[in-house]
């Protein structure tokens, strides 16, 4: 008996990984292009307040919606496990629960829209003249909350069932529609900031409607409707299990957002050049995430399916296999940043003081992918196993170490010290998950 016959899930293993990672990487790569289109369109208006308003408002919605990113992560893990058990009934009931949860959270966001807007304005304290366009954007964009959160859930379903090609298609629909509408509304109809908001709002609703149609086709429309009226769907114990995982993921996300906010605050205290240099280094982080997220998604789907089937051998196989590809990608980034880091920086800014700060931090840029890959990939593995508790515990420990190290390192080494603290944060996350990983395997049979 050959190894492939004994373990049929090994057949075409690399193709399976790339079938998930490839579309995910392409989908992620298309998103920044919309931001560039928006910036180009709004940047042609006569006053800079419009661009400032878009920047601030986009930041607010990124943080507000990202807070509920557990709807994507938690859904992926549960879906992958049900998919691994080949339990389509459980899949249908799960998606009904997650979609209902998404809508319920969206209703709360809409009810609290005015206090959220006022709080954001107070915290960010934008320059004079920005308030009115910021409010105009916020009042329109907030109505995309149901579409955004439902799309998180649908995306989680598609990743969990290893259908990232469809996820890529939906992401392209979102990005292309968004970019086209924004150009039409801003340049064609001269709608300014409101045009950007309406373009994004309409694009998100078009995409989520397409996603719902896809989900109905994949799960069977009539059977999905039957699941809605099935008493098992509304079993409180299942909602509580979903709530527990999502609450832990929510707490983890809040810690992550707080850590990133501390980066901006600390860089701001170091001066405008350091703040600008931090934005440049964030582009390097974005480039890293475009590649490494793809292999993390592959780990979510493949390890999650093995975990749902209770197969320890298969689970370990996909952990190792996806890690090999992720490590390969991280070494590619090390070489890329090592040889072309300064050239990339030169394309991002012409300001000499900023370029000097970034180039002096070149060793940190080179280390980012090789240090960060462990946390990225273990996140995917822990999501696949729906071990939200482990993710929260390791995030909390990493955050505590990071918070204690941030000020001393920044005081001692300035801007470089800030990014050493970020490396410590990433490294501690990955190291903590490495320590906890054996507990995942112990829950599975041989």
Image: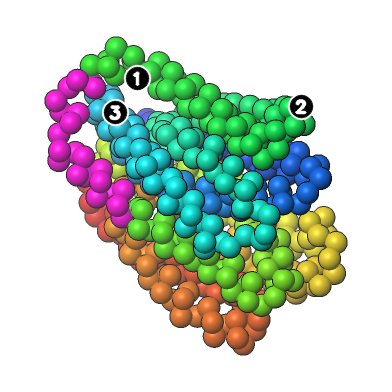
Marks 2, 3: nearer the viewer = 2
Give percent across and percent down for residue 411.
Answer: 60, 86
Question: Of all residues shown, which one is farthest toward the top?
Answer: 222
* Dot 2 and dot 3 residues touching (CB under 8 Å): no
Closer to the chain start, of discs 2 and 1, is 2
- Gap in angstroms between the C-alphas marked 2 and 3: 40 Å
Q: Is 120 included in the stretch rendered in magenta?
A: no
Left or right placement of residue 71 versus residue 292 in this view:
left
Residue beneath label 3, please?
A: 96
Marks 2, 1: nearer the viewer = 2
At a point 23% along the width and 21% down the height, the residue shown is 227
- Which region of the structure is painted magenta? 227-248
Q: Which mark is residue 188?
A: 2
Circle 1 Cα neighbour tier, 10 Å, few/some/many (<14 / 14–19 / ≥20): some
Circle 2 Cα neighbour tier, 10 Å, few/some/many (<14 / 14–19 / ≥20): few
Left or right placement of residue 238 versus residue 328 in this view:
left
Closer to the chain start, of discs 2 and 3, is 3
- Gap in angstroms between the C-alphas marked 2 and 1: 41 Å
- Above or below, 231 against 294 in this view is above
Asked whether 46 or 11 is in front, the reply is 46
């Amino acid at each position: 008996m050959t190894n492939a016959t004994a373990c049929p899930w090994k057949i075409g293993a690399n193709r399976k990984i790339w079938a998930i990672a490839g579309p995910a990487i392409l989908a992620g790569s298309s998103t920044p292009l919309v931001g560039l289109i928006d910036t180009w369109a709004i940047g042609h208006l006569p006053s800079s307040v419009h661009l400032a308003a878009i920047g601030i408002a986009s930041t607010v919605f990124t943080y507000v919606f990202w807070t509920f990113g557990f709807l994507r992560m938690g859904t992926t893990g549960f879906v992958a496990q049900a998919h691994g058990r080949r339990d389509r009934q459980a899949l249908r009931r799960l998606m009904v629960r997650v979609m209902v949860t998404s809508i319920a959270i969206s209703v709360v966001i809409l009810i609290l829209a005015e206090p959220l807007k006022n709080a954001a304005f107070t915290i960010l304290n934008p320059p004079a003249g920005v308030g009115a366009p910021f409010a105009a954007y916020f009042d329109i964009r907030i109505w995309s909350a149901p579409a955004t959160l439902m799309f998180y859930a649908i995306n989680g379903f598609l990743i969990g069932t290893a259908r990232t090609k469809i996820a890529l298609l939906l992401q392209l629909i979102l990005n292309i529609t968004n970019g086209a509408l924004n150009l039409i509304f801003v340049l064609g109809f001269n709608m300014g900031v409101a045009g950007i908001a309406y373009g994004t709002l309409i694009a998100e609703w078009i995409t989520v409607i397409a996603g719902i149609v896809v989900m109905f086709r994949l799960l069977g429309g009539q059977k999905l409707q039957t699941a809605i009226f099935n008493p098992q769907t509304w079993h409180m114990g299942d909602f509580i299990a979903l709530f527990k995982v999502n609450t832990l993921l929510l707490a983890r996300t809040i810690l992550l957002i707080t850590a990133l906010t501390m980066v901006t605050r600390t860089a701001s205290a170091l001066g405008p050049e350091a703040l600008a240099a931090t934005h440049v280094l964030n582009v390097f982080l974005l480039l890293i995430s475009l590649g490494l997220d793809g292999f993390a998604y592959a780990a979510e789907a493949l390890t999650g399916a093995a975990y749902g089937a209770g197969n320890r051998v298969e689970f370990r196989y996909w952990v190792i296999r996806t890690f090999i590809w992720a490590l390969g990608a991280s070494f590619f980034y090390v070489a890329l940043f090592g040889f072309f880091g300064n050239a990339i920086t030169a394309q991002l800014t012409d300001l000499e003081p900023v370029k000097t700060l970034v180039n002096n931090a070149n060793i940190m840029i080179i280390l980012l992918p090789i240090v960060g890959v462990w946390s990225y990939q273990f996140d995917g593995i822990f999501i696949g196993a729906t071990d939200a508790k482990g993710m929260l515990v390791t995030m909390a420990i990493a955050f505590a170490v990071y918070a204690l190290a941030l000020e001393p390192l920044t005081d001692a080494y300035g801007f470089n010290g800030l990014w050493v603290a970020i490396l410590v944060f990433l490294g501690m996350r990955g190291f903590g998950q490495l320590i906890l990983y054996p507990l995942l395997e112990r829950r599975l049979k041989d």
